Image (tube, rainbow, N blue to C red):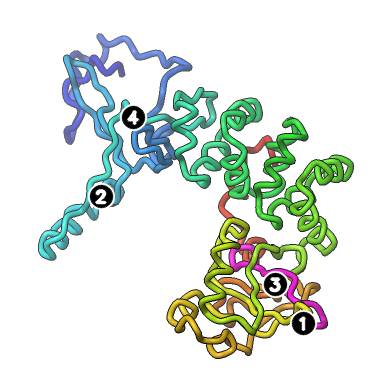
Amino acid sequence: MPFSEVAVLVAPVIPLNRPLAEIVPYQPDERDLYLARDVLDKQIIDTNGVRVVRVNDLELARVNGHFYISNVDVGELGLLRRLGFARGVQKIADRLGRKLPPGVIAWDNVELLPGNQPMRLRVAGDKMTELHPADLAEVISHLNRSESGRFLETLDVKTLADTLEEVEPEFQASLVETMPDEKVADVLDEMSPDEAADLLAEMPEGRGQHLLKLMEREEADDVRKLLMFPVESAGGIMTTEYVSVRPDLTADQVLATLREAANEVESISEVYVTDGDGRLRGMFSLKELVLARPETPVTDFMESRVASVNLTDSQVDVAQIIAKYNLSAVPVVDDERRLHGIVTADDALDKIIPTAWKKRLPRMYR
């Protein structure tokens, strides 16, 4: 029915303005947007807050006889309302003196992510770069090949590298397939060594070797080292971005070392202690370092019993060690206990618990 023939939309029974026999049925247009099918429960971009969110409910308004979408509800209250729990939860919240925060976005601030129909993104490029890399990856996963190529061209190298790290290596390879080698090499330099190695492993061998030659020497050497090991071994999934110190340093000297290494390592949660031959002697957390007196030797507050894995251990074995000892990362050593890298918890679990991105890749990339 045409909306113009609807007398009251929100009612137990929806009345029409005229008898059914007198109404000319509405003829759907290919440009029509179906709210339940195309909007409800879908991911959208909040162009005002610059974030990717999920549509839990829609608010309609009638103006001069026409119905419009006025707001989009992306909050928990909208979802509870659809499930029929909103009133009960609201009463409990009132008794506890708490307010359920609204999650409403004006329709004018909404940009639909492309679904089954091709839709051009209206969000300005500088606005899109404010999105978290995980949100940017969400956007890319909804675009076709040509759209994603144009979109990626708007991102700077660092943002592009962070975004690619949020998707699976095979999807990464398809996204950079038509990019100039010089730009791909710059992106690989910005990626963590283990992520860069995973991406290169998905590329044709000839192009992969050429890209390694274009990369910065230090970054390329780290990646080559990882490519020497099987993809699903500790050596293949480890990263060489970690901090190690000598056992003869004091807490104050370690802090000075960390300040110098801050630009070279993406994140620091644990510090590893190695001797002159690179053998793992212990480790300590940043908390233990901060609480130690400046003059305290590292050997006084380090943990000498350190769980570790071998370079050739399988990814399943690595994940089991991390889970057993509740670690955020585990050091990777050779038969002589020389430290070669660390495997973070998310990398260890990546193949065992597949990421949601694997399920959301566009069909054309599968």
Closer to the observer: label 3 or label 2?
A: 3
Residue at point 59%, 74% (across, down):
271
| In the image: residue 140, left or right of residue 78 | right
Give the x, y percent position of residue 308.
69, 80
Q: Whole-Å distance between the Cαs marked 3 and 1?
A: 21 Å
> In this figure, which residue is indicated by the disc labeled 4?
109
Compared across the picture, whether 100 is left or right of 324 comes to left
Q: In what quadrant of the picture does the N terminus appear?
A: top left
Label 3 Cα crowd, 10 Å radius (few <14 / some 14-19 / many 20+): some
Q: Nearer the viewer, mark 2 or mark 1?
A: 1
Q: CA distance from mark 1 to mark 4?
A: 56 Å
Which comes before the other along the chain, label 2 or label 1?
Answer: 2
Q: Earlier in the sequence, mark 2 or mark 4?
A: 2
Range of residues picked out in magenta:
332-348
The image's mark for residue 316 is 3
Distance between the alpha carbons at the discs numbered 4 and 3:
45 Å
- Residue density around tag 2, few if under 14, some if 14–19, many if 20 or more, within 10 Å: many
